[in-house]
Amino acid sequence: MFKLIYKVLFFCCALTTITSCDLELQEDYDYKSSVADPHVYMSAWDYFQTRKDLFSELIEAIEYTELKDYYTQTDNKYTFLALTNTALENYRSNVFPGMASIKDCDKETVKKMLLYHIVDGEYSSYGQLQIEPMFVLTMLPGEEGLMTMLVYKEPWQQVVGQIVVNQYGSNGHSPSRRAKTSNILPTNGVIHVFDDYCYYVK
């Protein structure tokens, strides 16, 4: 009985919706094409402040390790691999299990991890990166700082323009990571957003 009542009500609602629309069919319109501007017209640090829903733990980690100058300066261009709260939660649970805050973790270890996520120079999909893995220079010195980057450019792929760090087999046994969001352009470089942290494995 209830099923019959629901069917009748649904039919009446659908009929009312269809017959109550008196708008004329639009025959044509002037299409104005546009491209989204990737520039955010602020430093990487200021951009993180606008997205505390994503980067609150990254902000805390940067302040804790005293690396803020990299993100605020405008003399040099860097590629910032920005770690979301999810990425830093993964980092804490894997490297410092049981720690509830990034400030409870060893400061020097966290600093090295963040330095690995700052690349010297601008590397975006807009001409600087290749479709084959290329080595880039991170701010972490020595072998621990080895990193490769590439960009997907095949037009038939949904991931075109997406940045990949340490593609499988390109940098020892380092885990491959794909950017969640790519090519955000602050005034001091490029930002690529990751939901997991990157690291080098020999």
Image (tube, rainbow, N blue to C red):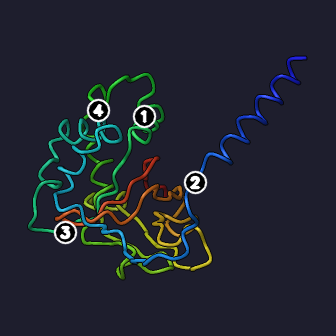
Q: Name the residue at 54% across, 69% down.
A: 26
Decide which of 36, 91 is in the foreground and name it.
36
Amino acid type assigned to the residue bearing label 2 in the image: Asp
Decide which of 100, 94 is in the foreground and name it.
100
Q: Of callouts 2 and 4, which one flags the residue occurring earlier in the amino acid sequence?
A: 2
Taking the image as shown, residue 62 lies to the left or right of residue 75, namely: right
Q: CA distance from mark 1 to mark 4?
A: 15 Å
Q: CA distance from mark 2 to mark 4?
A: 66 Å
Q: Is residue 171 above or below residue 115?
A: below
The residue singled out by tag 1 in the image is 89
Q: Name the residue at 60% across, 50% down.
A: 21
Q: Of callouts 1 and 4, which one flags the residue occurring earlier in the amino acid sequence?
A: 1
The mark closer to the camera, 3 or 2, is 2
Q: Count the marks.
A: 4
Q: CA distance from mark 1 to mark 3?
A: 28 Å
The mark closer to the camera, 4 or 3, is 3
Q: CA distance from mark 4 to mark 3?
A: 28 Å
Q: Of callouts 4 and 3, which one flags the residue occurring earlier in the amino acid sequence?
A: 3
Helix, strand or loop at mark 1: helix
Helix, strand or loop at mark 3: loop
Q: Of callouts 3 and 2, which one flags the residue occurring earlier in the amino acid sequence?
A: 2
Q: Position of residue 93 (x, y in %)?
A: 46, 31
Q: Which mark is residue 22?
A: 2
Q: Which mark is residue 106?
A: 4
Q: Which mark is residue 77?
A: 3
Q: CA distance from mark 3 to mark 2?
A: 56 Å
Q: Is residue 80 above or below residue 3?
A: below
Q: CA distance from mark 2 to mark 1?
A: 53 Å
Amino acid type assigned to the residue bearing label 3 in the image: Lys
Decide which of 138, 196 is in the foreground and name it.
196
